[in-house]
Amino acid sequence: MTIAGAFSKLFSPGPSAAEKQLLQRCRGDAGQLERLINLELSRRPNLSRADASKSALDRWSRDR
């Protein structure tokens, strides 16, 4: 691992609470989690990953 890679892992934030909850709703399917977050980001590219996770949770609740 490079120094830059170690540095970014050390200081990068972990998954948000919304992302963790979304992963639970996806029953641990990380691929599905990424697709849902990417869908929200494609609709509104200015969202952060945490906000995209919240938006995906809201959409999940509305659509189900």
Image (cartoon, grey):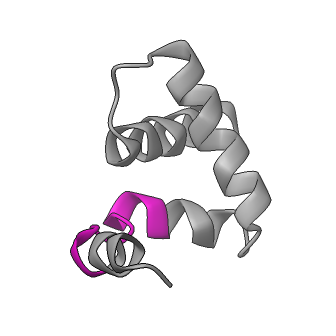
32 or 8: nearer the viewer: 8
Give the percent coordinates (x, y) of residue 4. Answer: 34, 70
Residue drawn at x 78%, y 58% is 31
Quadrant hosting residue 29: bottom right
34 or 27: nearer the viewer: 34
- Above or below — where is 52 with respect to 17? above
Quadrant hosting residue 5: bottom left
For this view, does 37 lie left or right of residue 35? left
Residue at far top of view: 43
Residue drawn at x 66%, y 55% is 33
Q: Magenta stretch?
A: 10-20
Residue at far left of view: 11
- Above or below — where is 53 with respect to 63? below
- Above or below — where is 46 with respect to 27? above
Residue drawn at x 51%, y 27% is 41
Task: Tell whether position 50 is magenta.
Answer: no
Give the percent coordinates (x, y) of residue 64. Answer: 70, 40
